[in-house]
Amino acid sequence: MFETIINQYQSIPNWQIGIEIIIFIFGVLSVYFAKKENVLVYPTGIICTILSVYIMFNAKYYADMSINIYYSIMSVYGWFQWKKITNGEVLSISRTNMKEKNIGIVLFLITSIVCIYIYKFFDYKLQLNNYLDIFTTSLFFTAMWYMAKKKVENWTLWIVGNTFAVYIFFDRQLYIIAIQYIIFTILAISAYIEWKKYLAK
């Protein structure tokens, strides 16, 4: 595996490797800050997603580029929500109510339909790997919205989505990204436990 990773990066310019390293570092930092309920989750996340947009655009992965544009927009929205003061209080960790659960389901379904349409638009024959990609993308879209609202369920979606993402990227032999998602999964489990403890108080 390590030999494959080295071979993959031999033909990549140093500046691109540098950007990917920055994306890796700030991606991990963003999840760590989210776990700690620290608003720095959003500026670090924005750096990660904007650079990812640039990398995906150059690589012509337009679907992945679009996802990261959404992440960037939702990061700005989440930053505003976490800093906003309502009735003298900032947003606190909570569980989703029935209305928010239904919104989450609708977001998931709309995202799935849009992703399938994108594949169909480019006349791409869907394989199992593509359906897994659509599934994880839809989970991540919903998780971003829940995180902006500080809903503990966001971590459940991240854990499930990250677990599938590890398989997807290992299957694509994108080992560094797969390792990053293993770290994301561990941090998400830890964050879920920490936020649950907060709710138990």
Image (tube, helix red, strand yellow):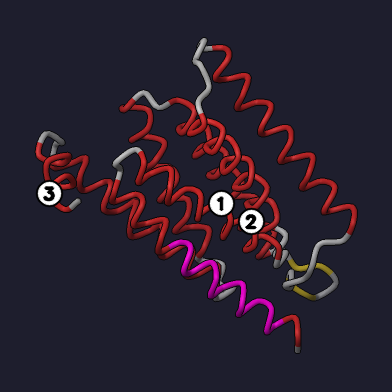
Compute the Cα span from label 2 to label 1: 6 Å
Q: Main secondary structure of the magenta part?
A: helix
Q: Which residue occupies the extreme bottom position in the image?
A: 201
Residue placed most toward the observer, 3 or 84: 3
The residue that disc 3 covers is 3
Residue 188 is covered by the magenta coloring: yes
Residue placed most toward the observer, 37 or 137: 137
Residue 17 appears left or right of 58? left
Compute the Cα span from label 3 to label 1: 28 Å
Q: Which residues are magenta?
A: 184-198
Residue 153, image x, y percentages: 71, 63
Classify mark 3: helix, strand or loop.
helix
The residue that disc 2 covers is 157
**Quadrant in which the C terminus appears:** bottom right
- Characterize the local packing of mark 3: few (<14), some (14-19) or many (20 or more) Cα atoms within 10 angstroms: few
Compared to 146, does 170 lie above or below?
above
Compared to 97, does 119 lie above or below?
above
Who's the residue at 42% across and 56% down the image?
A: 181
Compared to 116, does 156 lie above or below?
below
Ranked by sequence position, the earlier of labels 2 and 3 is: 3
The residue that disc 1 covers is 161
Compute the Cα span from label 2 to label 3: 33 Å
Classify mark 2: helix, strand or loop.
helix
Ranked by sequence position, the earlier of labels 3 and 1 is: 3
Who's the residue at 48% across and 34% down the image?
A: 129
Q: Amino acid at mark 3?
A: Glu
Q: Amino acid at mark 1?
A: Gly
Residue 157 lies in quadrant: bottom right
Residue 173, image x, y percentages: 29, 41
Residue placed most toward the observer, 99 or 87: 99
Would you say the residues marked 2 and 1 are in contact, meaning their CB atoms lie under 8 Å apart?
yes
Classify mark 1: helix, strand or loop.
helix
